[in-house]
Image: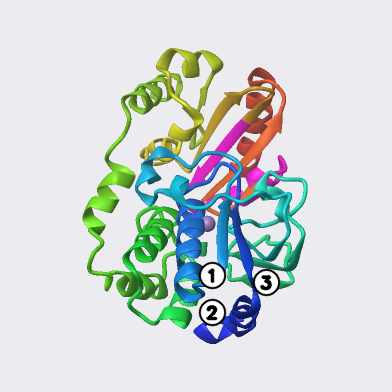
Amino acid sequence: MKLSDENFSDLVQALKQAGTAVVITHEFPDGDAAGSIAGCCHLLKSAFPSLEVSVYCKTPVPENYDYLQIEKLPHADLSLRYDVVLVLDCGNPGRTGEKSLPDTGLSVNIDHHADNSMFGDLNYVYPQSSSTSEILAVLGRRLLGITLPDRISEALFTGILTDTGGFRFSSTTSFTHEIAAMLYQSSGVDFGSLIEKVYFEEPFAKQKLLARILTSMEQSCGICFSHISSADWEETGATSKMVEGLVNQMVGIQGIIVAVLFQELPGIVKVSFRSKGKVDCQVLAGRFGGGGHSQAAGAKIQGLLKDIEPQVLKFVRETVK
Ligand SMILES: [Mn+2]
């Protein structure tokens, strides 16, 4: 199915009749998840003023995206029933971190992951899209025209910017730039300072954490790997909200094909995979029950860092060979 403004007719029809809607994204949100829920929430409020819209994300949004002011949006209670449930940037409902979606008359799945399980009553799944935010911008154009309100443009641009790694990943198309150009028409947004906030303004503790990652870093056979241990969290004062983007420092190294970052968390190890394109990260993460895209993916694995790190690296080495 080609992504066009017309694709959203059924959804627009349903939203016109709905009284309540909730917008949900995946736990451990990235820029696309954060931008998608903020952008979608503002979009629905602008297009359907009488619709009650709330948002939900199980874990905190990284500090880089504080300017989206997600904490000021109405937050949902998932034990309630909603006329429409929109699930954004999730390949399957489990990515929300919840056992089930709230009770609803209509579930809507808006996503760009190739392994999406088509779990919604309505499914808008476009793996050729750079980001869920890019898909939502087309919905925005359908509902409000090409000049979107600033707060919608700011949020959706954040998702496109970050999910393309700053318009670098192969998922970036001429259509991505067309949509970005459309968002630039929102004259009140300072896109330069937005990029500055996302990529160049870091908390002190995050830079200390980066120093730990770079110190523990090793490489072999084109694989660069490192970890964040319990002691690293404690001694730097960094939180898991601050890890966003750090693995990119490793994949950027000359001669590296794939980077792997392990985070030791209570009872689990979170593993992030990044690739320059030759190795499919979705295959690597998928082996351990995770998911993502070909150049960026992740998995949460139960167990201890000392056991999981060698297991994962063994599989990565076999895959790279
Ligand atoms: Mn995404």
Marks 3 and 1, how far apart at CA: 15 Å
Q: Nearer the viewer, residue 60 or 237?
A: 60
Marks 1 and 2, how far apart at CA: 9 Å
Q: Residue at x 50, y 30 (%)?
A: 240
Residue under label 3: 123
Marks 2 and 3, the one that precedes in the sequence: 2
Q: Is residue 87 above or below residue 97?
A: below
Quadrant for residue 155, please give it. Answer: bottom left
Q: Nearer the viewer, residue 192 or 284?
A: 192
Q: Amino acid at mark 3?
A: Asn
> Which of labels 2 and 3 is toward the front?
3
Q: Is residue 280 above or below residue 304?
A: below
Residue under label 2: 3
Q: Secondary structure at mark 1?
A: loop
Q: How many marks?
A: 3
Q: Is residue 272 magenta?
A: yes
Residue under label 1: 128
Quadrant for residue 66, please give it. Answer: top left
Marks 3 and 1, the one that precedes in the sequence: 3
Q: Is mark 1 within 8 Å of ligand 1?
A: no
